[in-house]
Image (cartoon, rainbow, N blue to C red):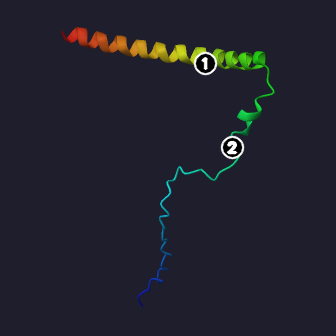
Amino acid sequence: MFNKKPKKEKKEKIIYIDDGSTIADMSNVEGGKAWKKRGTASSARDIWRTYWSAVRMMVKPTLIAVGFLLVAYGIVALIFLAMR
């Protein structure tokens, strides 16, 4: 008559072993930033052009964010001046 719940399976307990090293210990990792040793195939002009194109893309969003902050500051300043 009564529904019996199925038995839950026990989860395997994970055992962590501390070998004394830190998480950031990457002394055995080789490679990685090999491009720093070789340098880059790009010319200085290409790098400069890429940098300025990225800066130009961010001018408008930066101005919008600064404008928003100025408007918010102005509103808060008016509120506090009105309470004076």
Residue at 68% from the left image edge and 19% from the top image edge = 51
**Residue position for label 1:** 58
Q: Which of the pair 45/70 is nearer the observer?
A: 45
Locate the C terminus by quadrant: top left
Residue at 73% from the left image edge and 34% from the top image edge = 37
Q: Which of the pair 8/6 is nearer the observer?
A: 8
**Residue position for label 2:** 32
Q: Which three-letter amino acid code belongs to the residue tagged 1?
A: Met
Tell me residue 47's x, y (percent).
73, 20
Up the image or down, 34 lies above or below 67; here it is below
Residue at 42% from the left image edge and 12% from the top image edge = 70
Q: Which three-letter amino acid code belongs to the residue tagged 2?
A: Gly
Q: Does residue 40 appear to the left or right of 25 in the view shown? A: right
Circle 2 packing at 10 Å, graded few (<14), some (14-19), many (20+), is few
- Of the two numbered discs 2 and 1 on the same chain, state the one appearing first in sequence: 2
Q: Which of marks 2 and 1 is in front?
A: 2
Measured Cα–Cα span from mark 2 to mark 1: 30 Å
Tell me residue 40's x, y (percent).
77, 28
Residue at 63% from the left image edge and 53% from the top image edge = 28
Up the image or down, 7 lies above or below 23; here it is below
Q: Does residue 39 appear to the left or right of 9 in the view shown? A: right
